[in-house]
Every structure is written in C-alpha cells, then in structure tokens.
C-alpha cells in the first residue's frame, strides 16, 4: 500500500499532514510532479519523482503506477476518475472523497462548468485554501488511510 500525491498543486498543509502519517505508520509515500519536490531528509519512506514537462505527465505516471488499495491525493477530476476505476482510494486536498458512487456526477458537473466557462457564462475562482479545508482533508485522509491499511493487511493474510 502506497500514498500517491499529485504534488504540483498540492498545498503544503496537505503534504505536512501526509508526511506525519507516513512517518508514524511507515507508509511509502510518493510525490509526483513536473519538478523535484522537496522531501524532508528524515522521512526515508517519502520520495519525490519528477516526470517530464508537459500537461498531465504526473497524472499519467500516477495512473500507470498506482495499484488497487493505494491512496491518492489529487484535485484533478479526470485523474481521480481513472484512479477510482482502478480501485484506489482517492481524496482531494479539500477533503472530498472520490468514490465509484460519486465520481461520475463530479465529472459531469466539471464538464458542464467547463462548457459554461468556455461560453463566458461563468467566471470566478476557487476560494483560497483555508483552515476548514485543512481540517476536512485531515479527517477524510485519516479515514481513508485506515481503510487502505486494513485492506492491505487483509491481503497479506
């Protein structure tokens, strides 16, 4: 069982929460980005992988390497859809879990909003990442990490 972070845009608060859990539970954690991400030297179970420049290269890497039962953190809905289909536990940095029950509607809404933005009918930005988002992420991450670890332990038996 591994933790994958789509790290190009992941907030530092998210990385810190994941780093603490990885250290406490000794879980391999991989940050994937278009540039090398700084990883604390004291965390031997955490590493950074730099993919080549280009759109969606980190997404493709995570989709190819992630395995059923792994946990992934991404705000990218198409990537989340691919990972959910593959059997990974998936969460976004604001604490929303993507599951087989929710991913289709989330992708449909994303596509609808993209169409509206393309037509100039919707403008606006996502709210800044805040303390409420951090708390929601930590709670959902803890719950999904527990499920992923239990699944990995059952698979070993």
Image (tube, rainbow, N blue to C red):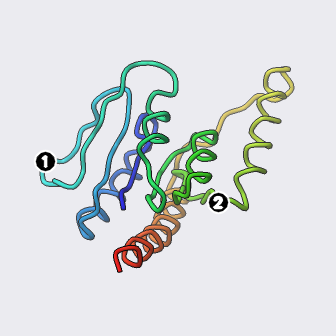
Residue bearing the label numbered 1: 41
- State the residue at coordinates (38%, 33%): 33
Q: Nearer the viewer, mark 1 or mark 2?
A: 2
Is residue 88 toward the left or the right of residue 45 in the image? right
Q: Which comes before the other along the chain, label 1 or label 2?
A: 1
Q: Depth check: give the residue in front, 4 or 75.
A: 4
- State the residue at coordinates (43%, 74%): 146
The numbered mark at residue 81 is: none
- Element carrying mark 1: loop
Q: Depth check: give the residue in front, 152 or 4.
A: 152
Q: Marks 1 and 2, how far apart in space? A: 33 Å
Q: Which percent across, then down, holds residue 3?
A: 38, 55
Q: Which percent across, then down, holds residue 153?
A: 36, 76
Q: Which percent across, then down, holds residue 136?
A: 54, 63
Is residue 114 toward the left or the right of residue 150 in the image? right
Q: Residue furthest front?
A: 157
- State the residue at coordinates (70%, 52%): 103
- Element carrying mark 2: loop
Residue bearing the label numbered 2: 99
């Amino acid at each position: 069982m591994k933790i994958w972070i789509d790290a190009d845009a992941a907030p530092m608060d998210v990385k810190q929460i994941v780093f603490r859990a990885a250290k406490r539970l000794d879980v391999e954690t991989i940050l994937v980005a278009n540039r090398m991400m700084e990883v604390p030297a004291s965390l031997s179970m955490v590493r950074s992988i730099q993919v080549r420049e280009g759109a969606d290269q980190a997404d493709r890497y995570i989709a190819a390497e992630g395995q059923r039962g792994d946990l992934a953190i991404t705000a990218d809905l198409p990537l989340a859809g691919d990972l959910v289909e593959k059997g990974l536990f998936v969460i976004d940095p604001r604490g929303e879990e993507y599951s087989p029950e929710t991913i289709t509607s989330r992708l449909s809404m994303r596509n609808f909003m993209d169409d509206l933005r393309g037509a100039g009918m919707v403008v606006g930005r996502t709210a800044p990442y805040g303390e409420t988002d951090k708390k929601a992420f930590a709670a959902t991450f803890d719950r999904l990490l527990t499920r992923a670890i239990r699944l990995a332990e059952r698979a070993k038996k």
